[in-house]
Amino acid sequence: MKRIFSVVPVLLLLATPWSGRAQGTFMTKTGRVSFLSTTILEDIEARNNAAAAVFDLNTGQLALVIPVKEFVFKRSLMQEHFNENYMESDKYPKATFTGRFTGADAATLGWAGSHEVQVEGELTLHGVSHHVKVPGALELKNGQLLASAVFNVAPADYNIEVPLLVRENIAKIVSIRVALSCDVVAGSGPKPTRSSPLK
Amino acid sequence: MQLPCYTLFSLLGLTAAGLAWAPAARAQTDLLHQLEREVAEPAKREVVAATFKGTRIINSQSVETPGAGTLAFLIQHRFGTLNSGAYQFFGLDQAVLRLGLEYGLTNRLTLGLGRSSQDKTFDGFVKFRALQQATGVQPLPVSVTLLASSSLTTLKFNETPDRSLTSRVSYAYQALIARKFNENLSVQLMPTLIHRNYVATAAEQNDVYALGGALRQKLTKRLALTADYYYLLPGPTARAFRNALGLGVDIETGGHVFQLHVTNSRGMTETFFVPQTQGNFFSGDLYFGFTVARSFTVSPQL
């Protein structure tokens, strides 16, 4: 029994170099970003399927560009107001994030399953940048890098003005959901494999 | 000039630290730039939105239509003239009202229905966004919306036999041509034809031609000044009636738009305000009025 305990770590150590080192750059132009504002009076939801993202697994860096005008609302008038008055999309057409993820690296990402990561960097919305740190998840599956994160943003922090009359209709904290399926960029490194040392 | 040793060292240290940090920071922005380069489509076509706040400017309809699946409910109100004196409470004792519904069948095609208390008139219209101002690939300098409306008065005339149905109907045809010059300024031109099946006097023509102009100038994000004007082309109507002029403000409260205005026209549909305006704007024949629009989403976009 005792021997098994010592064998497992050794096996792990041996296995690590053989497991697929997830390398290279992954990218998407059709990432999904949605947000939800919930108040007693109403729920406001909008979806965007045109977010672009790039992940560099070698360095742990990532960047995200969201075209603000691509958000679709249930109500067309709301969508117009969102672009015209709240986000001022003509002036600030893109929301961006640039930063790095920690908690998983090129080696561990090769293992099957979802990996919890911490994402840290600059979020720029409505022309205002803030340093943010949010939890996320990364998974390599069928040659794709799946990334997801759910985090909160306070519109007031980004100088997004809410008129008095609808102040009760729009949440102080808006929940943002990001789901990206990135494909490997050709020539950015060996194709990652899915082998796991524990299999 | 002699720098103390420790200053030199600390400078060196700072430089070294700076050098060590720089690549990481640069790599991050490089990644973002690389991504932005990847996604930057050469001058993507973008339709110019929100040329006007609502589907109405003051008297005129704007190039805007409710989006697909949106039903707009309009309450339009005109009080009496401001110069009617204290006895009439400066016009507030009298009012004409138009209730309207506008439904966006698609993002381009809208059907509307309305009922004005003036002459007990029903009206219906079809509005089609033929062209939309756009930037990028295949740019378009203007938006063009075509409007055809008809109205039917159900007033009881003291005539025996009473007037026939066809004699009660009038038509209006407009091409609304608008350009949003910048975030704040939008201008609209409106060549107009009014056809009335029946007119009582020779001074009123069956066909009246007019050219309208309107503008919107934003003052703040949610407040705008508006104006619209109709020039009647020379003829008996132009001699007997006045050109309709309106000045107003648009106040956006988030959910809906309040439009407050003064105009020399009492009627709120094209067949009234284009050929039948009688008030003299500059001698105080001003009707104070407002338009409130409330949008209901019948079929959501999501």
Image (cartoon, coloured by chain):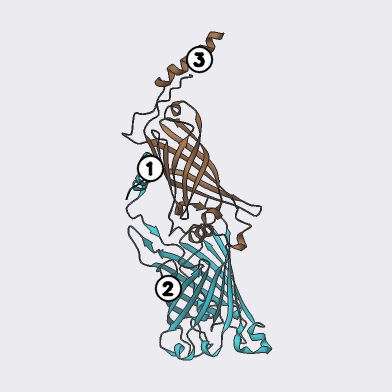
Distance between the Cα atoms at labels 3 and 1?
A: 43 Å
Instruction: Kindly identify which residue carries mark 2.
Output: B188
Does residue B259 show up?
A: yes
Which element type, helix, strand or loop, lies under badge 2?
strand
Nearer-the-camera pick, B171 or B227: B227
Instruction: Tell me the colour chain B is drawn in.
Output: cyan
Which residue sits furthest right? Answer: B87
The disc at residue A51 is none
Nearer-the-camera pick, A156 or A50: A156
Quarter occupied by the N terminus of chain A: top right
- The nearer-to-camera label among 2 and 3 is 3
Return the x and y of residue A64 as percentages of the image width and height: 43, 44
How packed mark 2 is, by other alpha carbons closer than 10 Å (few <14, some 14-19, many 20 or more), is many
Task: Please state the chain letter of the residue tagged with numbered disc 2 in the rendered image.
Answer: B
Instruction: Kindly identify which residue carries mark 1.
Output: B18
Return the x and y of residue A96 as percentages of the image width and height: 44, 48
Instruction: Kindly identify which residue carries mark 3.
Output: A8
- Judge whether B231 appears above or below B294 on screen: below
Task: Please state the chain letter of the residue tagged with numbered disc 3 in the rendered image.
Answer: A
Return the x and y of residue B216 as percentages of the image width and height: 47, 72
Q: Amino acid at mark 2?
A: Gln
Quarter of image, res A100: top left
Q: Are marks 2 and 3 in contact (CB under 8 Å)?
A: no
Task: Please state the chain letter of the residue tagged with numbered disc 1 in the rendered image.
Answer: B
Residue at 59% from the left image edge and 73% from the top image edge: B115
How packed mark 3 is, by other alpha carbons closer than 10 Å (few <14, some 14-19, many 20 or more), is few
Q: Is residue A190 left or right of residue A82?
A: left
Residue at 56% from the left image edge and 61% from the top image edge: B71
Which element type, helix, strand or loop, lies under badge 1?
helix
